[in-house]
Image: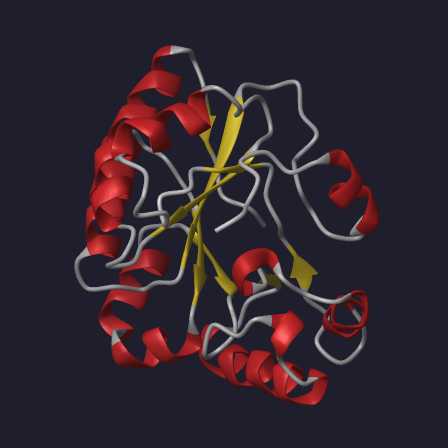
Amino acid sequence: MFYLIKAPWILQKFYGDCVWKIKTDEPVLYLTFDDGPHPKATPFVLDQLRKYGAKATFFCIGANVEKYPEVFQQIIQEGHSIGNHTYDHLNGWKTNDELYFRNVEKAQQVINSDLFRPPFGRITKFQQKIISGLRLKLKTIMWHVLSADFDDSLNADQCYLNVVNNAEKGSIVVFHDSQKAFSNMSGSLPRILSYYSEKGYTFQRLI
């Protein structure tokens, strides 16, 4: 499994119409959570965020929203942002364009957000053009730093270090509120919230 912890500048330039990082001089991090809602992982995340008065952004899979509507509503009720992560967690590089667009539209019916994140970060330039254009009018959010909590060859300590060694003011950081990532996420997120809070950082949602 190949991936880069920090988004390389050349990729950010190639997909220049996507959001990779927020320009700011303020000590702010933008924590994001992909693949939920999940009945175990999402409530854990919400509990941790609440302890620090932190807000975050949850990029939700449409099928999971329909499966766990109460958890989805809890995200919204606690003041966090939501985003579209397709209905079936599709890989844009491996999916017919029209099927991909329809899947995003299907998710939009239950998520209703202006924000979009492609699963795996894999989307073609054409797909991105349509997603951000008149048909869907969505803002595509990528990321600056991956915790890599999805990687079961890593442990929570390594995920923690992935973030603290790379995240800075304005960084958009990716975690996952999923069963697969739960061990690494639950072992690293509380420490990251504590570490950056002690440094005077706040945690804000994307809008």
Determine the residue located farthest toward the left in the rendered image: 40
Foreground of the two, 128 or 29: 128
- 4 vs 17, left or right, is left
Q: Check the image and report above or below for 28 versus 31.
A: above
Q: At 70% from the left edge and 36% from the top edge, which residue is drawn?
A: 8
Question: Where residue 41 appears, x then y in whole percent?
Answer: 23, 54
Q: Residue 66 falls in which quadrant of the image?
A: bottom left
- 128 vs 37, left or right, is right
Question: Where residue 169 appears, x then y in whole percent?
Answer: 58, 22
Question: Where residue 1 appears, x then y in whole percent?
Answer: 48, 51
Q: Residue 114 falls in which quadrant of the image?
A: bottom right
- 8 vs 26, left or right, is right
- 37 vs 98, left or right, is left
Q: Check the image and report above or below for 74 versus 61.
A: above
Q: Check the image and report above or below for 8 versus 137.
A: above
Q: At 39% from the left edge and 19% from the top edge, which residue is drawn?
A: 196
